[in-house]
Image: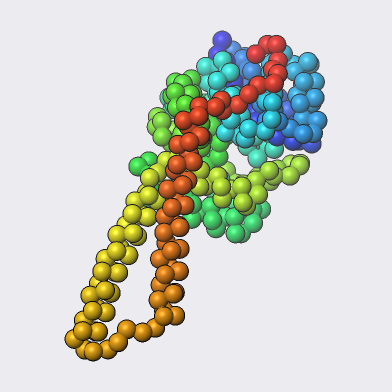
Amino acid sequence: MEKISIIVSCYNEEKVLPLFYEELIKNIKKFPKNVDFEIIFVNDGSKDNTLNIIKSLSNKDSKVKYISFSRNFGKEAAIFAGLQNSTGDYVTLMDADLQDPPYLLIEMYNYIINENYDAVGTKRVNRTGEPIIRSFFAKIFYKLINKMTSFEMVDGARDYVFMKKTVVNAILSLKEYNRYSKGLFSFVGFDVKWIEYKNIQRVAGQTKWSFWKLMKYALEAITAFSTTPLIISSIIGLLFCVVSFLLIIAIIFKTLILGDPTSGWPSLVCIIFMVSGIQLFSLGIIGQYLSKTYLEVKQRPIYIIKEKSENL
């Protein structure tokens, strides 16, 4: 018997969970009879009825297991917890909002079995339904981060990944506190097959990702996988030193040789403000990296479990 672990992170998903479970079970039935399943729901500190719904599903279906956090630790922590507690030969990550279509599961499985890929990832070919400004900044983000890192992060990639246990073990070996799963999946490498599909709107409930949260998430990704911003701040500092040195020489020449007295305090104030802004910007970049180091050094747990199912 082969076993597939399906990890589903949940945060306030009471409206969509019954629909997701029904659709998932319908597609699980398409698999060969020698394939067993475990469905691990990770309740990420939901405030609604999500946990009770998961418990009722677990009571009626032995394949359903659950982990419930003591508070909201974030999706990255939920993914990590699910991977740590999975026991399958293959593992897949899914969102409960049905934006990760369950009908792709059998296709992903077949690619790994028949073509010997280590993992099968999914990516959206469009962003239909998303705000234009969010789509614009998403494309900018992927262009920037791919120039900053030594490996490629695929534009439009989802966390919906089907992988062998070897890939899971490689990801779990990366113990950092500040986690960005898309980057970690790209970092570990392996042979990955990408499946493209059109963007799907969530069937119920509301997205938990505001524009501000996505911006913070993007900064997490950049600081987690690249030191390029530090290099940029150093180059800017060096450039301003050179410019200021040249300006000093020009002012000395203009004053002593040409006899033109120095003047223009408003322009001087503007220059001071600009240089101060550059300094604060550079300090802010350094501060971001220091804050990540501070969080890593404290070695706090990535998540805390309040309760979990007996069969896990």
Picture coordinates of residue 100, whole percent (x, y): 63, 37
Residue extending farthest to the bottom is 259
Front residue of this view, candidates 178 and 238: 238
**Is residue 249 something that shows in the picture?**
yes
Q: Residue furthest left?
A: 257
Q: Where is residue 19? Give x, y as percent.
A: 76, 33
Residue 100 against residue 238 in the figure, above or below: above
Q: Residue at x 65, y 40 (%)?
A: 99
Residue 123 locus on image (x, y percent): 53, 42
Which quarter of the figure is the C terminus placed in?
Answer: top right
In this view, the residue in front, 251 or 123, is 251
Residue at image location 59% in from the left, 24% down from the top: 81
Where in the figure is residue 207, as x and y percent of width and height? Answer: 69, 44
Position of 252 compared to 262: left or right?
A: left
Residue 183 in sight: no
Residue 153 shown left or right of residue 202 in the figure: left
